[in-house]
Amino acid sequence: MTSAPRALPAVGSVIERAAIRALAERWTTPMVTDAVRAIIAAARTGSPLPSDDTAWVAAIDARLTEQTRPSLRAAINATGVVLHTNLGRAPLARAALAAIGEIAHGASTLEYDAERGVRGSRHTHCARLLCELTGAEDAIVVNNCAAGLVLALQALAAGRETVVSRGELVEIGGSFRVPEIMTASGTTLVEVGTTNRTHADDYRRALSPRTAAIVKVHRSNFVIEGFTAEASVRDLRPIASEAGVPLIHDFGSGLMLDLSAWGLTGERTVPETVREGATLIIMSGDKLMGGPQAGIVLGTREAIGALRRHPLARALRVDKLTLAALEATLALYRDPVRARREIPALAMLTETPEVIRARVVAIADAITAATGTAVAIEPCEATVGGGAFPTARIPSFAVTIAADAPSLEAGLRHGAIPVVGRIADGRLWLDLRSVLPEDDEVLVQMLLQALQPGVR
Ligand SMILES: *Cc1c(COP(=O)(O)O)cnc(C)c1O
């Protein structure tokens, strides 16, 4: 049996109603008209038609709210991967947020030397602080670690050869492939050694009058075990200096503090890496350093000077907001205790499992009390992410929900503030180690909305 076609209202008759006309204050008349048209069109294919003015207003509001949502918006990372590249890597410290606000608000000394009243250089801003904290001679900040490598190779090795181990021609995160970036930087790769073993002598034999640089890449996101050998920066330093070429170290993570007391062992800190003596050391600002997206290049005055003078430095430079956030983040490292507490990435990685468990219990209680949904509190293992400490498993706790896990997972992703968890063993897992404590309340609200879609 088919039902008789419903009589649909005309667009004009709907938008004439006082309640609907009033919506033009929040939106615009054309937006409201379009929404009404779309709702009527949807009713033609079976969607319910709003029954009264209140329902019309709600439907129009819902439609326009959805339509005007920014594409880039806040989310909650409950994956347990603390530095999640797809979710924006390191959250910024309060000090960094304040610095961004202050510098974004008005004019700044971006390229102005206020003391002397003359033009200054944006490249000076974080350089002194980076040198103070790491022991490097000089520093330059660019767009990201990849940009740092491109600039270093363009400035020092374009048109000539760069020697690199086959064991280090790796892919790190989406679309960063060492061999491709190097080739795109205008240098000719000379691969030495094998996937599992490369010796200092392999580098020595590859040197020629065309050699411009030796590159050492930190493998970052995987480990190789068994019959392996690699030449360290210390092994390579004499080879590079005999050949009179720079040794470029793509170091990646930017770890500033020793976290071994928290079970995170096996990665060198930036100051330790600087002491190893590569000519240039390149790292990300938004991994373990816990700052904004940036590429930090540390090195000798001569090499950094060459990078600063290269035309590409202009194309790869960072904006004032990045410099403000980076300088404020770096300043926290003057007091390591404060840095570990106030830089969110470090606070998340070093929080005790007991504190995380207490947060999980509070969330589970709130959900059960409001909805009666069965929520379990489960131990789990978080990871660092961002291509650092790839094998580290950090004890953590998760809220897990078994009922209708796939649709709940989707519901959470579709919320006003997407919550990203993971499905395992047929349950939804929300690992609290990668969630900022101040987001717990929002997480509860989003969970309630996803569990009871009708209720607001
Ligand atoms: C993460 C990483 C990169 C890429 O860093 P971006 O800042 O994302 O460009 C390059 N090299 C190493 C060794 C890394 O760990």
Image (cartoon, rainbow, N blue to C red):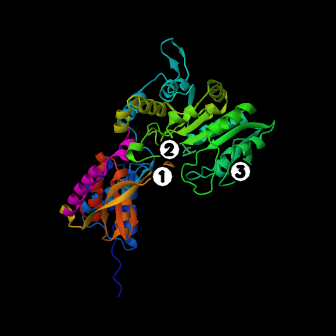
| Residue drawn at x 35%, y 50% as measured from the top left | 435
Position of 259 compared to 312: left or right? left
Q: Residues within 10 Å of mark 2 (few under 14, many from 20)?
A: some
Q: Which residues are magenta?
A: 343-368
- Mark 1 = which residue? 86
Give how far across and how far down residue 85 sits, in percent.
48, 50
Under mark 3, the amino acid is: Gly
The picture quadrant where one finds residue 37 is bottom left
Q: Quadrant of the N terminus?
A: bottom left
Under mark 1, the amino acid is: Asn
- Say how many tags the image has: 3
Give how far across and how far down residue 354 sits, in percent.
27, 51
| Residue drawn at x 56%, y 28% as measured from the top left | 139
Q: CA distance from mark 1 to mark 3?
A: 33 Å
Q: Main secondary structure of the magenta part?
A: helix
Q: CA distance from mark 2 to mark 3?
A: 23 Å
Label 2 secondary element: loop
Q: Are marks 2 and 3 in contact (CB under 8 Å)?
A: no
Q: In the current view of this chain or complex, which residue is farthest to the right?
A: 209
Q: In the rendered structure, find residue 267 and report the number of the disc placed on it.
A: 2
Q: Is residue 452 above or below residue 111?
A: below
